[in-house]
Image (cartoon, rainbow, N blue to C red):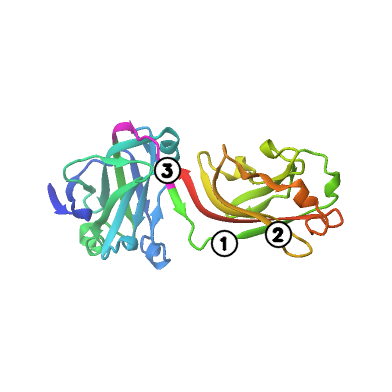
Amino acid sequence: MASSISGNLGEEVARSISEESPSHYILKIQSFSLLIKNGIEKYESGEFEAGGYKWKLLLYPNGNKSKNVKEHLSLYLLLADVSSLIRHSREVHAIFRFFLLDQSKDKYLIVHDAKEEDRRFHRLKHQWGFDEFIPIRMFNDVSNGYLLEDNCVFGAEVFVTKEMSSGKGESLSMIKDAVSSKHVWKIENFSKLDSECHESQEFFAGDQKWKIQLYPKGRRNGSGTHISMYLALADTASTLMAGSRILAEFTLRIQDQQQNRHIAGKYSYWFSASNQESGWAKFVSFPYFYRSGIGYLVKDICMVEAEVTVQAVATTL
């Protein structure tokens, strides 16, 4: 016996009856009413394998409120190992069917796409299903046998039809109301610095660690004539996902400790694992920095400040 009804998103959803059990997964729920009573809006099943991939069922016992579903149970198929698709830039096409056991007749109600069209699971869309899987009134009606003694049995079959390469992609997240972070670095015995590069302690801005790099004898085209200074990402191996980029607006300053005539540079830059630093090889010339009567170096102490605002994060899909 088979029938078709109009389903979610205007698609045709077919319903049929079968004595065959689902071949891939069965989910038995005892004390079903306690899901709603205890405020559990959705239940995510354990993983099961079909077609070489891992899947889950996602059940909304009182309807998917995020889609304004009313008076229906919502049921979805979820691809569990999305990370593998991202790593290999793949997408999976699959046909699936959901089952609901009529415990009185020991037969299954099967719900599936009427045209048996496959669904494309990929990094941006890894969940498909039915917003209006079954009316709650029909599900609760004892004469239908779906909910007996507060117990019910769902099931699923998943058939992978093809796998394809999905190419590369990127997700850009702009940060609303981004907060600026400041870090002050006190450098003592400045005239005795003998290393080519000196680094501040690490500090956080956004979700990333940063550090200031100062070259007292200059770097690149500022070598021997200027102090060079940069902002750099720190600990990229543990805090930055592969292929990610961070847009940061930053200001580096050498403070005038006497007259507040600070030397400052401001810039916006996309930082990444391959481009970890940005700044100025010619931040300030030696004659200007060391001249008498100016407070950039007081009692051989130099005060350096960084102000960083992370404005956006771009990650690979």
Q: Position of residue 78 (x, y in %)?
A: 36, 46
Given residues 82 and 57, the one toward you in this image is 82
Residue type for callout 3: Glu
**On the rendered structure, is 291 left or right of 27?**
right
* Main secondary structure type of the part rendered in magenta: strand
In the rendered image, which residue does mark 1 sit on?
Answer: 179
Magenta stretch in the rendered image:
160-171
Given residues 32 and 236, the one toward you in this image is 236
Q: Position of residue 205 (x, y in %)?
A: 61, 55
Mark 2 burial class by Cα count in 10 Å: few <14, some 14-19, many 20+: some
Q: Position of residue 146 (x, y in %)?
A: 26, 56
Question: How far apart are the alpha carbons under marks 1 and 3?
Answer: 24 Å
In the rendered image, which residue does mark 2 sit on?
Answer: 262
Position above or below: 134 against 172: below
Q: Are marks 1 and 3 in contact (CB under 8 Å)?
A: no
Dot 3 or dot 2: first in sequence order is: 3
**On the rendered structure, is 266 left or right of 59?**
right
Given residues 15 and 252, the one toward you in this image is 252
Position above or below: 57 against 136: above
Question: How far apart are the alpha carbons under marks 2 and 1?
Answer: 22 Å
Whether residue 7 can be seen here: no
**On the rendered structure, is 264 left or right of 151?**
right
Query: Is residue 162 located in the magenta-colored stretch of the structure?
Result: yes
Assign a secondary structure to mark 3.
Answer: strand
Residue at left 86%, top 50%?
A: 189
Query: Is residue 153 located in the magenta-colored stretch of the structure?
Result: no
Q: Which mark is residue 170?
A: 3
Label 3 vs label 2, nearer the camera: 2
Q: Position of residue 310 (x, y in %)?
A: 55, 54
Dot 1 or dot 3: first in sequence order is: 3
Question: How far apart are the alpha carbons under marks 3 and 2?
Answer: 39 Å
Q: Are marks 3 and 2 in contact (CB under 8 Å)?
A: no
